Image: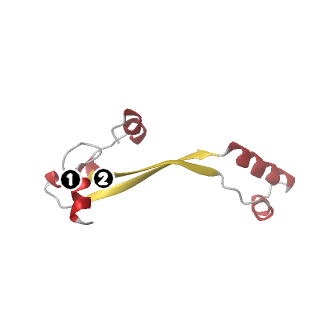
Amino acid sequence: MKEHELRKNATCAICGEKTLATGFPLFCTVTIKQYKIDDGAIRRQAGMEMMMGGSVQLAQAMGADETMAKQVDSKKIIVCFNCVTGKQINIAEQLAKGKI
């Protein structure tokens, strides 16, 4: 990571502190990807399984190999060493509050 990237990503998304304020020169980047299940694709695959006598493997081989879940959002966050190793956080709650 170059200096300008480091400066841009110098704050922990969880606690709001500078990443090096922990005194330990490690931090993490975490990518959070949200997916939505495609109900139609699930129903079609389940129907294929029923038509194949309940054989999942046969239905997978004979089916259309559809995407069952589609990505709807992605976020990359910076997390300091203290938050990575010590805190229990509710990621969904943090996302809903706009903290992440």
Crowding near the residue tagged with mark 1, few <14, some 14–19, many ≥20 C-alpha atoms within 10 Å? many
Which residue does the image show at 37% across and 33% down from the upper left?
97
Which element is circle 2 on? strand
Given residues 83 and 20, the one toward you in this image is 20
What amino acid is found at the position of numbered circle 1 in the picture? Answer: Thr
Given residues 86 and 68, the one toward you in this image is 68
Which residue does the image show at 40% across and 35% down from the upper left?
93
Given residues 68 and 84, the one toward you in this image is 68
On the image, the x and y values in percent for residue 79 come to: 29, 51
Q: CA distance from mark 1 to mark 2?
A: 8 Å
Can you say which quadrant of the picture contains the C terminus?
top left
What residue would you read off at disc 2? 78
Res. 27 image quadrant: bottom left
> With respect to residue 17, does 49 lie above or below?
below
CB atoms of marks 1 and 2 within 8 Å: yes
> With respect to residue 96, does 19 lie above or below?
below
Dot placed on the residue nearer the N-terminal end, 1 or 2: 1
Res. 28 image quadrant: bottom left
Which residue does the image show at 16% across and 52% down from the upper left?
22
What residue would you read off at disc 1? 19
What amino acid is found at the position of numbered circle 2 in the picture? Answer: Ile
Which residue in the rendered view is the most extreme toward the top? Answer: 97
Which element is circle 1 on? helix
On the image, the x and y values in percent for residue 20 come to: 16, 55
On the image, the x and y values in percent for residue 2 come to: 24, 66
